[in-house]
Structures are given as C-alpha cells and as structure tokens.
C-alpha cells in the first residue's frame, strides 16, 4: 500500500483528500503544518508528500528544504498543492526540487491520476 502524507491547514481540503486517497488504496497520514510532516518522517518514508505552502509554524517551502536534505527521502515524490498561483511561486517550488506544483482549485481525480503516474 502506498503511503501519502497530506499537509494542509484547511480542514475541508484535508478531509476530502484523505477520503479520496483512502478510497484509492493509499495509507494516508494527515499533517496540519510542516512540523507535523517532519514528525512523520522520523518514523516512515512515504511514497508521496502533498504540501500546501501557506501553513502555520513551518510553511511548505521550508518543509521541502528540510526534506531535500534527507538522503533517505530522495525517492519520495513531493508535490505542492497551493493557492499560490503566481508564476514566481511555481518556479520557486519546482526549482527547490518539488516533483510537481498544482494550484487550487484542482481536480481530485486528476491529482490522483498524476500521482499514480509519478509513482508507477
């Protein structure tokens, strides 16, 4: 079973993504900010991390920076899922090493399909 960490501070987004990924056979872990993501990473190596950028405590950019320093996570796909749709933000996210940058609003069906293709 593929493991996914979903990090977002919006409850409705977390719930809909959690439901959809579980329905598609994923083992889902929920984080409300970057520090919670890093806590999960102490004990597991997920297949995918979905990261919002604007979160309390530790934002998505800072979280990605820390993830990229961990050699054990080099095969983990990191995808930004953000309302920040400015081309400069998208460029920054991809330059930092994100595997994809998806802007909100998004299609859950397309998101799952894209992740399936990335992790096949």
Image (cartoon, rainbow, N blue to C red):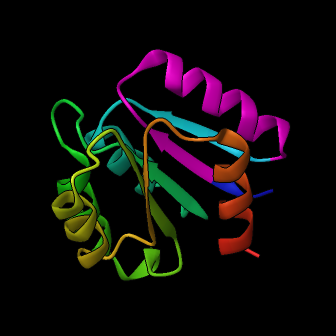
Farthest residue in the top direction?
Answer: 12
From what the image shows, is residue 25 above or below residue 72? above
Q: In the image, is 116 to the left or to the right of 83?
A: right
Which quadrant would the C terminus be assigned to in this image? bottom right
| Whole-percent x, y for residue 45 in the image | 54, 64
Q: Nearer the viewer, residue 49 or 41?
A: 49
Relative vertical location of residue 71 with respect to residue 103 in this rendering, above or below: below
Residue drawn at (48%, 35%), measured in percent from left and top? 105
Q: Is residue 69 visible?
A: no
- Hey, which quadrant is residue 108 in on the image? top right
- Tell me if residue 37 can be seen: yes
Residue at (65% x, 31% y) in the render:
18
- Looking at the picture, does residue 71 appear above or below residue 49? below
Q: Nearer the viewer, residue 79 or 34?
A: 79
Q: Quadrant of the N terminus?
A: bottom right
* Residue 112 position in % (x across, y down): 70, 51
Q: Which residues are magenta?
A: 4-25
Check if residue 39 falls in the magenta segment: no
Q: Give the residue drawn at x 77%, y 37%.
A: 22
Rendering coords of residue 24 (x, y %): 83, 44
Residue 11 percent coordinates (x, y)? 46, 17
Q: Is residue 61 left or right of residue 39?
A: left
Numbered-mark total:
0
Q: State the image quarter where residue 2 is shown.
A: bottom right
65, above or below 61, in the image = below
Instruction: In this rendered view, identify the residue nearer to me: 111 or 67.
Output: 111
Give me the residue at 17% from left, 56% from top.
Answer: 62
């Amino acid at each position: 079973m593929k493991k996914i960490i979903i990090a977002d501070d919006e409850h409705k987004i977390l719930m809909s993504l959690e439901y959809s990924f579980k329905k598609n056979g994923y083992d889902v872990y929920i984080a409300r900010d970057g520090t919670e993501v890093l806590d999960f990473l102490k004990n597991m190596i997920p297949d995918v991390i979905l990261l919002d950028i604007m979160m309390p405590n530790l934002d998505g950019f800072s979280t990605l920076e820390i993830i990229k320093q961990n050699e054990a996570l080099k095969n983990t796909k990191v995808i930004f899922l953000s309302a920040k749709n400015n081309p400069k933000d998208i460029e920054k996210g991809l330059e930092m090493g994100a595997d994809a940058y998806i802007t909100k609003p998004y299609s859950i069906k397309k998101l799952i399909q894209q992740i399936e293709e990335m992790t096949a």
